[in-house]
Image (cartoon, grey):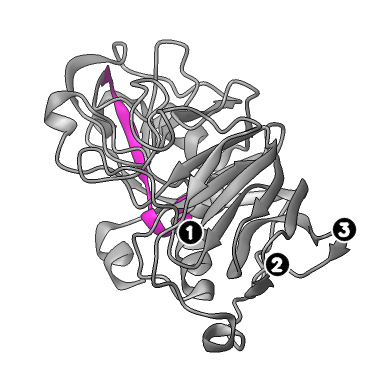
């Protein structure tokens, strides 16, 4: 079985949980931006966690199915139609041979996730099917999908009858995204004034944001003597402060090391909310302790 791309989305790539064990060689983890929506999509179609899905940004596109199967779309609030008839998000969709599924423009949120029973069976590269566009590896030829592409689907997926009762809750997309953060490894590089601004002011997601990181516009985070450091490892959600003082939250396609001080690290469970934020939307950071993060 396969899925044919009739109309590609604005940026649609094959992703899974990520590529781990190669950061020491400079290979980013990649993987889905919104792990919560990803896990729910696989659950709805009965896949084991870790199967590959399509991550769709802004607009999903149109896909034709060559065999009967079951599909589901989660994440952003995107209009979903099957053979031009509206169908719901966040539940299994019965697909018949020859059906066309269209995932429209996101009305709220930014990224949607399309899962099919059996998962997208592109080659495993370094332990993952995730697309790394910068290195042009994984996914489908290491690139975003294009019209005419055909994606193989794994065998042995669940039938619609086996999963038809499954449901997940729709996401909420607040106008102000509140993100919990833990103090970063170089917090001492910043003045009390700088840290106060970071934790009390509102930031705006920049147009320059992408899968590598979210650049934020707003008050500068003042440092004591600059933010240059000896390069060290970059964790998912690291909030790096370059010389401009404007925060950058580093995400799925982040570099493996970096030479700017990190004022904070985003609590992992809040990353799915952050990455559904659109350019122009507002973000605020709330400090929590490591002990509090471990209790949530």
Per the image, the residue denoted by label 3 is: 84
Number of other residues with Cα within 10 Å of mark 3, as a class: few under 14, some 14 to 19, many 20 or more: few
Instruction: Give the camera-side residue of 75 and 146.
Output: 146
Q: CA distance from mark 2 to mark 3?
A: 15 Å
Q: CA distance from mark 1 to mark 2?
A: 13 Å
Badge 2 marks a residue whose secondary structure is loop
Q: Is residue 125 above or below residue 70?
A: above
Q: Position of residue 11 (x, y in %)?
A: 61, 33
Report whether residue 57 is seen: yes
Highlighted range, magenta: 259-271
Image quarter where the C terminus lies is bottom left
Q: CA distance from mark 3 to mark 1?
A: 25 Å
Write down the quadrant of residue 135 in the picture. top left
- Name the disc covering residue 38, or none: 1
Residue 61 lies in the magenta stretch: no
Residue 268 lies in the magenta stretch: yes
At 32% from the left and 63% from the top, the residue drawn is: 293
Answer whether labels 1 and 2 touch (C-beta < 8 Å): no
Per the image, the residue denoted by label 2 is: 89
Q: Position of residue 88 (x, y in %)?
A: 76, 70
Instruction: Give the camera-side residue of 71 and 172.
Output: 71
């Amino acid at each position: 079985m396969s899925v044919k791309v009739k109309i590609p989305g604005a940026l649609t790539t094959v992703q899974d949980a990520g590529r781990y064990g190669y950061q020491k060689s400079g290979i980013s983890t990649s993987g889905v931006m919104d792990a919560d929506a990803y896990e729910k999509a696989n659950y709805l179609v009965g896949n084991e966690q870790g199967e590959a899905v399509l991550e769709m940004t802004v607009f999903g596109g149109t896909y034709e199915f060559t065999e009967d199967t079951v599909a589901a779309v989660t994440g952003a609030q995107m209009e979903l139609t099957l053979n031009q008839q509206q169908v719901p998000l966040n539940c299994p969709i019965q697909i018949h041979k020859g059906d066309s599924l269209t995932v429209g423009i996101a009305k709220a949120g930014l990224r949607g996730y399309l899962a099919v029973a059996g998962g997208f069976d592109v080659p495993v590269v370094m332990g993952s099917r995730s697309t790394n566009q910068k290195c042009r590896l994984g996914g489908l030829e290491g690139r975003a999908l294009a019209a005419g592409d055909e994606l193989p689907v794994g065998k042995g997926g669940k039938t619609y009858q086996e999963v038809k009762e499954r449901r997940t809750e729709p996401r909420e997309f607040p106008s102000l995204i509140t993100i919990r953060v833990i103090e970063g490894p170089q917090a001492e590089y910043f003045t009390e004034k700088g840290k106060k601004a970071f934790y009390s002011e509102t930031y705006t997601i920049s147009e320059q944001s992408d899968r590598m990181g979210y650049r934020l516009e707003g008050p500068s985070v003042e440092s004591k003597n600059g933010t240059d450091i000896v390069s060290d490892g970059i964790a998912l959600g690291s909030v790096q402060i370059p010389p401009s003082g404007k925060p950058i939250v580093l995400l799925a396609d982040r570099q493996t090391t970096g030479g700017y001080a990190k004022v904070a690290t985003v609590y992992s469970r809040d990353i799915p909310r952050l990455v559904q934020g659109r350019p122009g939307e507002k973000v605020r950071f709330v400090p929590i302790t490591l002990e509090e993060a471990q209790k949530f």
